């Protein structure tokens, strides 16, 4: 995703628009001017951490312009400089007595002789209690259709009363322009994070331009996929968004902004220190933002990015058709297209023909390293085949009369590759089978087709991913936010070993082993590992817990 920014003061002393240019935000003299005149208009990030709702501050390295330490803040001449050397007498007054320190350390050490083992036993008791509770839960049979604990959790992303209102367009630091990259859900992640960056910079966000040049070759604009008016109005209290840069601002630019690529998972202060225009903006914000900014991410992703009426209507129509045929259904994001297999570097037994075809596709990515197909499979990096997905689902307990919706593009190997899955689940459906002629207007546009798949997968009782791609992450996060609807992520590393040995064991043993390796990957609330996973997949800051009436359920929920 490209991101560029035109920084401007609303008016200068002569009433004209002031445009700022420079390699970094700190080098823009008119922005520093703006900071000195009205500090609240230029708020940035103070080390990436702050009290929730508190305004960000611009921070300068060393001494600021005109002797200022922080932008917009001048030293008080009536107070001594805090960085100066203290007098010897003052230094002596602040040093504690060595006798006092020695006595304190002795007392603390003596007390620890009698209390240390008590604390250790108490901690161990708590750990052992939690472990025993989890062991009991792990031995319980899993309801494959719905978690028994899902009703205890709900999405909560409402802005707090301390979260400042959006800066008006005529008071903002400038206009933020982004150009997305990748497929639909990669672009969705980039748009979500761009809104947060606009908030950090106190900038006015211009409605993003979608990627027309990637592998998918889709020339759809933002308004062709998302409800642009809803997007602007829903976020109006958080960020000011406009459909285009005002004409007079565009005409007054005497040169194009600088271009650079932001590091992945950047802390918020990167955008203050470094960036005016960025390329490849997907995943360019860290997972470790303060809670209010994380909730803003959720408001964008789960509420503001609503599909257009034509896409939403068709997607919901397909969900209704499936519900008429069956009260519940499983959706599988198969992700077994040629580009995915080529990117993974995996091998599926197709001989020289497969190696040649996937090798040619792989050349489209200049930076991909040489990979060992065997190593990638042993590491669990290879997508499961359609047959392996079917075997996993049957082993987990889904019967052959289960209705299956398969979200996919062109499957590598065609019908021959799909047939084993269709044999395992005869009630097999795709958007092409369900929509008929209604799908014709969308056929030339891969992103709009992906949006329809997104809606049907989101509406399913169980969603099964087959890789760790962007659609899998975004949908898994959304389903957690919407009440922990069941999402199954295959343990590809361990399942690979089971598939290799499947003929050496009976079906019951195989099924038992599959259920065991899938523990922790079934979409239960305790699947979440705080601090270790992507926020878009595990939006912890936006998930709250209900207080149940049943005390025994409460006790069990606390151990999740």
Image (spheres, grey):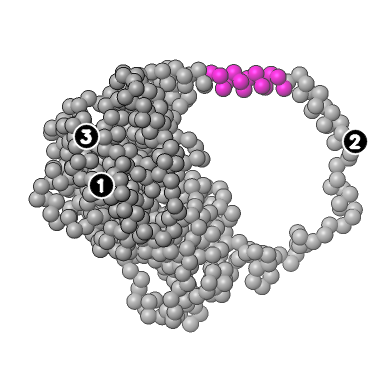
* Quarter residue 477 falls in: top left
Q: Residue furthest left?
A: 437
Q: Is residue 119 one of those drawn in magenta?
A: yes
Residue receiving disc 1: 412
Residue receiving disc 3: 420
State the SS at label 2: helix
Q: CA distance from mark 3 to mark 1?
A: 14 Å
Nearest to the eye among marks 1 and 2: give it: 1
Which residue occupies 87% across, 33% down? 102
Along the line of sight, which residue is nearer the eye, 477 or 247?
477
Q: Quadrant of the N terminus?
A: bottom left
Residue receiving disc 2: 99
Q: CA distance from mark 1 to mark 2?
A: 78 Å
Which residue occupies 37% across, 64% down? 179
Which residue occupies 48% across, 24% down? 559
Sequence-first disc among 2 and 3:
2
Q: Quadrant of the C terminus?
A: top left
Disc assigned to residue 442:
none
State the SS at label 3: helix
Looking at the rendering, the stretch of residues picked out in magenta corresponds to: 116-129
10 Å crowding of disc 3: few (<14), some (14-19), many (20+):
some
Residue 165 seen from this side: no
Q: CA distance from mark 2 to mark 3?
A: 80 Å
10 Å crowding of disc 1: few (<14), some (14-19), many (20+):
some
């Amino acid at each position: 995703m490209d991101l560029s920014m035109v920084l401007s003061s609303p008016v200068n002393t002569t009433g004209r628009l002031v445009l700022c240019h420079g390699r970094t935000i700190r080098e823009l003299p008119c922005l520093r001017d703006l900071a000195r005149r009205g500090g609240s208009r230029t708020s940035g990030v103070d080390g990436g951490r702050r009290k929730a709702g508190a305004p960000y501050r611009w921070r300068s390295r060393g001494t600021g312009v005109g002797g200022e330490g922080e932008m917009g803040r001048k030293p008080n001449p009536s107070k001594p400089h805090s960085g100066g050397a203290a007098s010897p007498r003052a230094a002596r007054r602040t040093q504690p007595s060595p006798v006092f320190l020695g006595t304190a350390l002795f007392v603390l050490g003596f007390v620890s002789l009698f209390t240390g083992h008590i604390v250790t036993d108490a901690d161990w008791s708590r750990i052992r209690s939690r472990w025993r509770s989890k062991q009991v839960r792990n031995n319980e049979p899993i309801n494959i259709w719905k978690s028994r604990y899902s009703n205890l959790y709900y999405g909560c992303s409402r802005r707090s009363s301390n979260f400042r209102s959006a800066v008006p367009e005529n008071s903002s630091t400038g206009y933020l322009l982004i150009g997305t990259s990748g497929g639909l859900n990669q672009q969705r992640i980039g748009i979500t994070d761009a809104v947060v960056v606009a908030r950090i910079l106190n900038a006015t966000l211009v409605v993003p331009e979608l990627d027309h040049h990637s592998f998918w070759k889709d020339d759809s604009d933002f308004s062709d996929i998302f409800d642009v008016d809803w997007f602007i109005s829903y976020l109006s209290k958080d960020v000011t968004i406009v459909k285009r840069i005002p004409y007079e601002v565009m005409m007054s630019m005497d040169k194009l902004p600088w271009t650079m690529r932001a590091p992945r998972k950047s802390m918020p202060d990167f955008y203050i220190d470094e960036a005016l225009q960025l390329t490849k903006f997907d995943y360019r914000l860290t997972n470790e933002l303060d809670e209010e900014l994380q909730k803003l991410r959720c408001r964008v992703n789960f509420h503001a990015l609503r599909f257009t009426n034509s896409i939403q209507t068709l997607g919901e129509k397909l969900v209704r058709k499936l519900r008429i045929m069956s009260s519940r259904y499983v959706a599988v994001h198969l992700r077994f297209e040629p580009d995915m297999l080529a990117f993974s570097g995996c091998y599926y037994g197709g001989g020289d023909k497969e190696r040649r075809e996937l090798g040619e596709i792989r050349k489209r990515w200049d930076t991909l390293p040489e990979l060992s197909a065997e190593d990638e499979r042993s590491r669990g990096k290879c997508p499961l085949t359609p047959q392996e997905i079917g075997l996993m689902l049957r082993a987990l307990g889904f019967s052959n009369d289960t209705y299956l919706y398969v979200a996919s593009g062109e499957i590598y190997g065609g019908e021959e590759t799909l047939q084993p899955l269709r044999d395992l689940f005869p009630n097999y459906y795709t958007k092409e089978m369900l929509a008929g002629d209604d799908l014709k207007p969308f056929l030339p546009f891969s992103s709009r087709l992906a949006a329809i798949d997104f809606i049907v997968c989101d509406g399913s009782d169980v969603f099964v991913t087959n890789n760790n791609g962007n659609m899998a992450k975004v949908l898994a996060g959304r389903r957690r936010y919407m009440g922990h609807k069941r999402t199954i992520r295959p343990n590809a590393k361990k399942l690979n070993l089971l598939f290799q040995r499947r003929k050496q064991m009976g079906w019951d043993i195989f099924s038992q082993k599959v259920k065991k390796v899938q523990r922790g990957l079934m979409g239960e609330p305790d699947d979440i590992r705080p601090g270790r996973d992507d926020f878009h997949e595990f939006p912890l800051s936006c998930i709250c817990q209900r207080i149940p009436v049943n005390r025994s359920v409460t006790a069990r929920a606390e151990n999740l």
